[in-house]
Image (cartoon, helix red, strand yellow):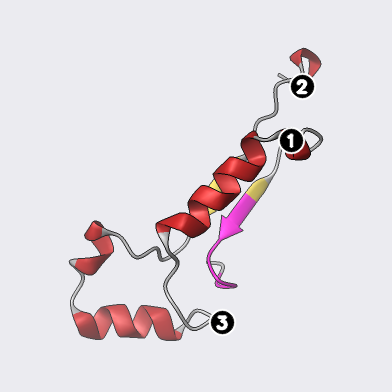
Amino acid sequence: MARYQVTVNAICPGFIDTQMTRGIPDQIREQQVAKIPLGRAGQPADVAALVAFLASNEAGYITGEVINVGGGYVL
């Protein structure tokens, strides 16, 4: 795709506070959040900000990357 000036990247969200993760029992949620170095669950806006950046002209030279959005916690 790069030869056509199309960038391709992968975003790997970590533990994001969504309707799905809110359905996890509180004790398990707290255990998961405790493992995150930043000490909080991510927000959808955290992922959206990266999507917006990667779609912008400012990210025109970034391609072939796998980017974790997980507050420092990587599986």
Q: Is residue 12 above or below residue 8?
A: below
x and y, in percent, of residue 60 in the image: 77, 33
How many residues crowd around disc 1 within 10 Å: few (fewer than 14), some, or many (20 or more)?
some
x and y, in percent, of residue 72 in the image: 60, 72
How many residues crowd around disc 2 within 10 Å: few (fewer than 14), some, or many (20 or more)?
few
Along the viewing direction, whichever of 58 and 20 lies nearer the viewer: 58
Label placed on residue 37: 3
Label placed on residue 30: none
Q: Amino acid at mark 1?
A: Thr
The residue at the point 18 percent across, 66 percent down is 23
* Quadrant in which the N terminus appears: top right
Region in magenta: 67-73
Tags 2 and 3 in contact by the CB under 8 Å rule? no
The residue at the point 21 percent across, 70 percent down is 24
Q: Residue under label 1, please give it.
A: 63
Q: Is residue 71 left or right of residue 28?
A: right
Cα gap from disc 2 to disc 1, whole angstroms: 8 Å
Tags 2 and 1 in contact by the CB under 8 Å rule? yes
The residue at the point 40 percent across, 80 percent down is 33
Q: Secondary structure at mark 1?
A: loop
Tags 3 and 1 in contact by the CB under 8 Å rule? no
Give yes or no for residue 49 being in the magenta stretch: no
Q: Secondary structure at mark 2?
A: helix
Cα gap from disc 3 to disc 1, whole angstroms: 27 Å
Q: Amino acid at mark 2?
A: Ala
Q: Is residue 57 left or right of residue 36?
A: right
Q: Residue under label 2, please give it.
A: 2
The residue at the point 34 percent across, 85 percent down is 31
Q: Secondary structure at mark 3?
A: loop
